[in-house]
Every structure is written in C-alpha cells, then in structure tokens.
Image: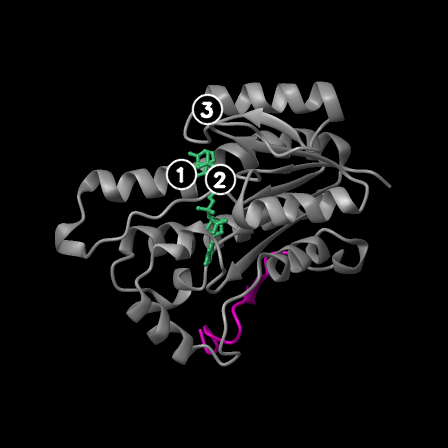
C-alpha cells in the first residue's frame, strides 16, 4: 500500500536516507528543502519549518500531489554548539525554534489529516544527547529532550485514533552535522561507543521505517535509541 510520507529536512543527511528508504518501498515521498535543488525522484517542497505559513503552504502542495500526509518524519534540525557562558539567547532560541517548535508546527498540521483518516504514524528524530546531555550543546540537548515530552503527550492525545507517535534517538551518524567535529573530539566519542563506530544513515532509516510499519502498530510513546550503545542506562 503506497502511503503519503513527508520527511522534513529530507534533502540530505539522515532525512534523505529515510526518504529514499520509503520511496524504495513504493511510498509517495515528499521532502522539505530550503535552497538549491531537491533530490531527484522525491517531491521537493520548499519550506523553512520556523515559518508557520511556509509549513501550511508545503502541506497544501503535498496534499494536492499525494493526498494528506499519513506518515510524518520530523527530522529537520540544527546545532549551534558553544559553552553555556558563551551561548547567546539567539543561539538558544534559534535551535529550539527549529528543532522543537518547528516539529510542533509540522506535527500539529499533519495531525489534522491523520485525525480525519483515523490513522497515522509520526516519528520524531531526537538525539542521544537529549537524555544524556552534552557539554557545548545545552540548546540542542534541551530541544531534543523537549521532543520526548512532546511526543509522549501527542501519543496520549492521538493514540485512540490509531495514530502512533514515537521518537528515534540516534547517536553519532556520519553526516554534515558531525563532520564539523574536530579529530580529537571524534576519537574521544568513538572510545565511548560500545560498537566503536559511527552509524550509517541507513541504520537510522531502517528503524524509522520499522516504526511506521504494521509490525510496530502497538508501539507508541517510545524512545528508540540507534546509538551503538552510547546512551545505555539513560
Ligand atoms: P544535516 O545537517 O546533514 O541535515 C539537517 C537537515 O535539516 C537538512 O535537510 C536541513 O535543510 C534541515 N533543516 C535545518 N533547519 C531547517 C529549517 N529551519 N527548516 C527546514 N529544514 C531545516 O543533519 P543530519 O542529517 O545529521 O541530522 C538530521 C536530524 O538528525 C537532525 O534533527 C539532527 O539533530 C538529528 N541527529 C543527527 C545526529 C548525527 O550524528 N548526525 C545524531 C543525532 C540526531 P537545509 O539543507 O535546507 O539546510
């Protein structure tokens, strides 16, 4: 059965791998992008998730092309790492506005169609650091931890309508986001990961797809780590 899927930030990195995984399964996949050209074979809708009007417009475009969104993957996210004393209010609020409030904007909009259809699958991409914390990432960790409380509240509100809401918490994944880390920091991180390597984007995509499948129909409000064991115990 071909579903209408939206992956925010699906133009590159983890989001693109997720989008490609759904497309390979025959789903109708839309992705958001902010600039440049969208990847081939996917419906690209230009959308900055910090702007409610752009979110509304993107959903209208998707609904016209693919029908109401049945599977939402809220993946778009940013970092603005720096130590607390150096962190400006703008560093903090811009990360929260994208990672947490941006997710609220798309989940709220997607839930309208899902409630009408009385079915839906929502997956939010959080991070291991949302639970463990990370020096230099107070803004990012706060936004990613916020996603957990948000998802669990939505899971409770929408569960009786056959809509599941789950969180995937990746550890370190090979993308542009982690490329910027210095060699010393990377070596330090690797020592802490039981599987002793970064994740490949497809290893995150596989778990996201599972959570939207029939096999996961009784899972909601869960936080699934995909972190090579890095966050064990949190
Ligand atoms: P990338 O930096 O490679 O990609 C980020 C994506 O988010 C891009 O598609 C970007 O779009 C999009 N995005 C950022 N801000 C906005 C916005 N305001 N509106 C719309 N789209 C936006 O990151 P990753 O692929 O590594 O990360 C994807 C998700 O996974 C993020 O939420 C991240 O926090 C999370 N994550 C990543 C980990 C990692 O190790 N890489 C670990 C744990 C979690 P554009 O191309 O327009 O900039």
Left/right placement of residue 171 relative to residue 24 reads left
CA distance separating discs 1 and 3: 11 Å
For the record, the magenta segment spans 220-234
**Residue at the spot of label 1:** 98
- Between discs 1 and 3, the one toward the N terminus: 3
Label 1 CB-ligand 1 distance < 8 A: yes
Answer above or below: position of 213 versus 104.
below
Q: How many marks?
A: 3
Q: Is residue 223 visible?
A: yes
> For this rendering, which residue is in front, 46 or 175?
175
CA distance separating discs 1 and 2: 7 Å
**Residue at the spot of label 2:** 103
Looking at the rendered image, the disc whose residue lies closer to the viewer, 1 or 2, is 1
Q: Are marks 3 and 2 in contact (CB under 8 Å)?
A: no
Left/right placement of residue 7 relative to residue 54 reads right
What residue is rendered at 59% in x and 25% in y?
A: 45
Quadrant location, the C terminus: bottom left
> For this rendering, which residue is in front, 158 or 111?
111
**Residue at the spot of label 3:** 52
């Amino acid at each position: 059965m071909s579903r209408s899927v939206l992956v925010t930030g699906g133009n590159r990195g983890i989001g693109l791998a997720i989008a490609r995984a759904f497309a390979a399964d025959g789903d109708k996949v839309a992705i958001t992008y902010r600039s440049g050209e969208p990847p081939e074979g996917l419906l690209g809708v230009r959308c900055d998730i910090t702007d409610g009007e752009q979110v509304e417009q993107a959903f209208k475009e998707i609904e016209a092309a693919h029908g109401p969104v049945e599977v939402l993957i809220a993946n778009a996210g940013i970092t603005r790492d720096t130590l607390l004393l150096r962190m400006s209010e703008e560093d903090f609020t811009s990360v929260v506005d994208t990672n947490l409030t941006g997710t609220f904007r798309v989940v709220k909009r997607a839930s309208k169609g899902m409630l009408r259809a009385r079915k839906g699958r929502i997956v939010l991409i959080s991070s291991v650091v949302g639970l463990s914390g990370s020096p230099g990432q107070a803004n990012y960790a706060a936004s990613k931890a916020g996603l957990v409380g948000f998802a669990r509240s939505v899971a409770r509100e929408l569960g009786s309508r056959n809509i599941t809401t789950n969180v995937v918490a990746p550890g370190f994944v090979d993308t542009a986001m982690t490329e910027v880390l210095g060699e010393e920091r990377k070596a330090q991180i690797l020592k802490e990961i039981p599987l002793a390597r970064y994740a490949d984007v497809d290893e995150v995509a596989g778990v996201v797809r599972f959570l939207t499948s029939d096999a996961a129909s009784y899972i909601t409000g869960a936080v699934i780590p995909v972190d090579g064991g890095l966050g064990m115990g949190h």
